[in-house]
Image: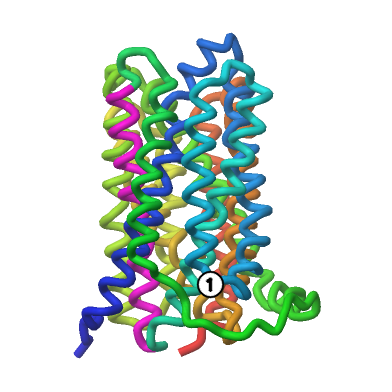
Amino acid sequence: MRQALTKRPTLLVGALCATYGLLYLGRVNVSVVLPMLAQDLGLGLAEVGALGTVFFWFYGLFQFVSGEVGSHVSPFRIVSLGLLATALINVLFSFQSSLVIMLLLWGMNGIAQSGGWSPMVRILAERLHPREIKRASTLMPFGYVIGTALTWTLVGALVAGGDWRIAFWLPGLLLLLVLAAWRKAGIDAPKTKSSGVRLAVIVSGARGIVFLLLVAGLAGFVRNGSLIWLPTYILDTGLIADGMVGTVAALMQIIAIPGLLVAHFRVASSNQVFMTAVLMFAAAGVGFLLVTGAAGPVSMLLVGFALMMLNGAFNLVITSIPLLMAPPGRASSIAGTVNMMATFFGGTAGFAIGRLLEISDWSAVFALWGAALLLAALVVWWKRAEEKP
């Protein structure tokens, strides 16, 4: 019989989920306004899509840095600094009219946002009992899924009047309130004496998770690509009024929650993280491939199903599997390295999907996403024997 998480771990996981989810106020807000930005600045979709590319590239690179630093420095301080920086950057972004300056600021935002995930994973690893980690780790994605949905709903409503700038300065101010709440909560990992950064330890850790880095890259390309371009796809279908795009995109993120529940309950009942990831990646891949032959509301339903499965599998790759495979004291570093790959390849989707849409159509995008996820399922299945009990 499964035991529920004790009260203290539940509160801890809930606080981390809420804080990380609210970070998305200053992160995915740009997705809703990409077409509006392109029109206002007189640019093409590929050019404004580069905002997503530069964000994820900087975010990915500094995920590795913040992950390693998070193994030696207080996670509480790193998260605090990230919240403050992303709040100020969003406010500054709202005053810009030059794509070059916007790219610079959004790259800096990627650096600021990188201070969230890996340090929080360290807190989970060092504050929870080992028997609680598998189930607790499957709860973390609820934060960023709900955060994305909340942001898209809020921003979609705010920019319906035609002013994209409010999509940045208001989330920036709200994030200052989130920072105040985080500071008051004071959540941190236990104090330990750091042995210092050692290259041999970093290389050894990365060598042991090469297969996971490949899977993270494939999954990140699809997931982050959908975060950047999903509102545009919904707009292009012509099924939804322009002012409702943000709300509908948010609902499609909420639809992903059943996928997270599937992952959570299957892991809790079977104690198998790897095979759960295999099944969910395969289902998402097939779902995206089916979209290429569908149209109208059916295509929207298939996209929702694929996203539902993808979110469940993606979380296992960036949270549960790194926690299972990380040596003692290295959870932040391993999580940071995995996230680096997911976000670096996810960043290429900003420009690459924009370019693919200019030379082809959405069927080509969904076919590419489906093939990538089926390959990810195959790789995890091949390495399934490496899962620790």
Question: What residue sits 46% from the left and 59% below the top?
Answer: 314
Residue 322 visible in the current orientation: yes
**Occupied quadrant, residue 20:** bottom left
Quadrant location, the N terminus: bottom left
| Main SS of residues in magenta | helix
Q: Position of residue 125 (x, y in %)?
A: 46, 79
Q: Count neighbours of disc 1 (C-alpha within 10 A) and say few if under 14, some if 14 to 19, many if 20 or more.
A: some
Viewer-proximal residue, 15 or 318?
A: 15
Viewer-proximal residue, 34 or 89?
A: 89
Q: Secondary structure at mark 1?
A: helix
Indicate yes or no whether the magenta region holds residue 145.
yes
Q: Which residue is mark 1?
A: 381
Q: Which amino acid is tagged 1?
A: Trp
Judge whether 281 appears above or below 192 on screen.
Answer: above
Question: What residue sits 49% from the left and 34% below the top?
Answer: 90
Judge whether 32 appears above or below 242 on screen.
Answer: below
Indicate yes or no whether the magenta region holds residue 279.
no
Q: Position of residue 312 (x, y in %)?
A: 38, 60
Residue 385 visible in the current orientation: no
Judge whether 286 appears above or below 72 on screen.
Answer: above
Viewer-proximal residue, 170 or 357?
A: 170
Q: Is residue 352 left or right of residue 16?
A: right
Q: Is residue 89 left or right of residue 6?
A: right
Start-end of magenta stretch: 131-158
Q: Position of residue 334 (x, y in %)?
A: 61, 71
Question: What residue sits 63% from the left and 52% below the top?
Answer: 60
Quadrant location, the C terminus: bottom left
**Occupied quadrant, residue 17:** bottom left
**Occupied quadrant, residue 293:** top left
Q: Position of residue 341 (x, y in %)?
A: 64, 57
